[in-house]
Image (cartoon, grey):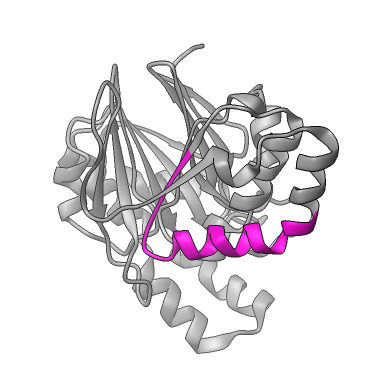
Amino acid sequence: MSDRVVLLGTKGGPALRAGGAMPTASLLEMDGRRVVVDCAIGVTKGLVEAGMDLRALDLIFITHLHSDHVLELGPLIHTAWTTGLKTPVTVYGPPGIDAYWAGFLASMAYDNAIRVADEGRVPLGDLVQVVVYGEGVVLDGPLRVSALRVPHPPVVDAFALRFEGARVVTFSGDTAYFPPLAEFARGSDVLVHEALLPAGVEAIIAKTGLGDKLRNHLFASHTKAVDVGRIAQAAGVGRLVLNHLVPADDAEITAADWLAEVAQTFAGDAAVGTDGMEILL
């Protein structure tokens, strides 16, 4: 297994549009571990298309509980289970993740019970451990995982995640511009950071019809691409990859537009994430 990051979905926000990118989910394979970071709709298919055997599902981290990061968590685990998963899965998530999982099991109680009785499966609930995490070291060992609380109002429990093993990979999660994130990500081989392009915001407002409240949320809760560059430069990262793009499906905005903003503040290697992009570590 090559150490790599695969961006399974790179769109910011929950809406789906024909021919467009899928919402946020990523796969990190490093030091023999398979880590899924966020589980938006489409994550299961994305993992299969990335070449992962769902029976090898191992670790899942949820950065926060917005739907475009957690909607397909339960269905992913359930589909892996019906595919033949027999080994434990650990889900790390912010406060509320345990309630989500309990609710999912309750919603699928009929199907789960039938499959245990009729097909001889291990009860799904017995395979899954849910761990509620906060800021600090989340997992210690050959793969070390740390969390930093980031500002993503009105969500209080939103986190960036740093994975340290043979390489160092940091995911910003959803965040407003947050200079302390540069120290948290310092020396990362890869920084996967969310990004907003102000020039595309009005088109989003027009498509959704949500007006000032959505506009205010986008600017208060996300990081402009030019500021993403500032974080990457201060952190001294080896490579910056833009993710959770807002907008991700505007035909008038190209990768060159994103990179021009980043280049104002970051002198290193940068790329604009696309669904299915593989970053070798």
Magenta-colored span: 90-110
Direction from residue 226 to residue 12 in the image, left or right:
right
Q: Which residue is at a point 74% across and 49% down the rendered structure image?
A: 112
Q: Position of residue 4 (x, y in %)?
A: 46, 22
Q: Which residue is at a point 38% across and 52% down the rendered structure image?
A: 173
Q: Position of residue 83 (x, y in %)?
A: 75, 31
Quarter of the image containing the C terminus?
top left
Q: Is residue 240 above or below residue 230?
A: above
Direction from residue 254 to residue 82 in the image, left or right:
right
* Residue 158 in sight here: yes
Q: Which residue is at a point 37% across and 72% down the rendered structure image?
A: 155
Camera-side residue: 266 or 107?
107
Q: Position of residue 218 (x, y in %)?
A: 44, 72
* Residue 19 in sight here: no
Q: Is residue 193 above or below residue 32?
A: below
Camera-side residue: 160 or 188?
160
The overriding secondary structure of the stretch rendered in magenta is helix
Q: Quadrant of residue 68?
A: bottom right
- Residue 260 belongs to magenta span: no
Direction from residue 104 to residue 6 in the image, left or right:
left
Q: Is residue 236 above or below residue 206?
A: above
- Residue 99 belongs to magenta span: yes
Camera-side residue: 1 or 178?
1
Q: Is residue 31 above or below residue 174?
A: above
